[in-house]
Amino acid sequence: QVQLVESGGGLVQAGGSLRLSCAASGSIGSITHMGWRRQSPGKQRELVASITTGGSTNYADSVKGRFTISRGNAKNTLYLQMDNLKPEDTAVYSCNAVTLTGLYWGQGTQVTISS
């Protein structure tokens, strides 16, 4: 079992920055990769970024060059640095962790970008 708790969401103006954090606990040694997904009203949840235990990253085209995913040295924290934010980035952002036996989600954190 893996537990995930996100933090760092909020309201910022377009062009601003936010840093999301996701604290993982439980069987973190079994995690193969982690990621961030977002969902805005009326839209399907979409991948934002993901990272493997080896450090390989993947980004949605819409956030490339603006967002950076990383893991803390202890591997129990996932970060998403979001720069040059746009109103279309407004969504609930959730982190997830994949293990050999399951997929786990955090509760999500609201990110709102004002124009």
Image (cartoon, rainbow, N blue to C red):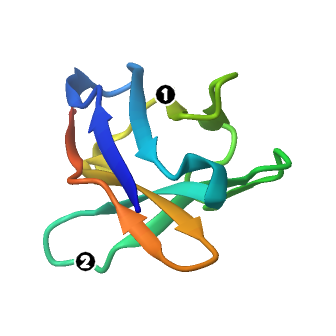
Choose mark 2 or mark 1, whichever is in front. 2
**What's the residue type where badge 1 is placed?**
Asn
Picture quadrant where residue 76 is located = top right
On screen, residue 42 versus residue 61, left or right, reads left
Residue at which label 2 appears: 43
Residue at which label 1 appears: 84
- Residue 42 appears in the rendering: yes
Residue drawn at x 31%, y 51% is 93
Picture quadrant where residue 43 is located = bottom left
Q: Determine contact: label 2, label 1, CB under 8 Å.
A: no
Q: Is 101 above or below relative to 89?
A: below
Give the camera-side residue of 75 and 64: 75
Q: CA distance from mark 2 to mark 1?
A: 22 Å
On screen, residue 51 versus residue 96, left or right, reads right
Which element is circle 1 on?
A: loop
Picture quadrant where residue 70 is located = top right
Give the camera-side residue of 85 and 26: 26
Label drawn at residue 37: none
- Residue 33 appears in the rendering: no
Residue drawn at x 63%, y 59% is 30
Residue drawn at x 52%, y 32% is 79
Residue drawn at x 29%, y 54% is 106
Q: Badge 2, how many Cα within 10 Å: few under 14, some, many 20+? A: few
Q: Position of residue 85 (x, y in %)?
A: 41, 33
Q: Position of residue 9 (x, y in %)?
A: 24, 31
Q: Badge 1, how many Cα within 10 Å: few under 14, some, many 20+? A: some
On screen, residue 57 versus residue 108, left or right, reads right
Give the camera-side residue of 75 and 18: 75
Q: Position of residue 3 (x, y in %)?
A: 34, 51
**What's the residue type where badge 2 is placed?**
Lys
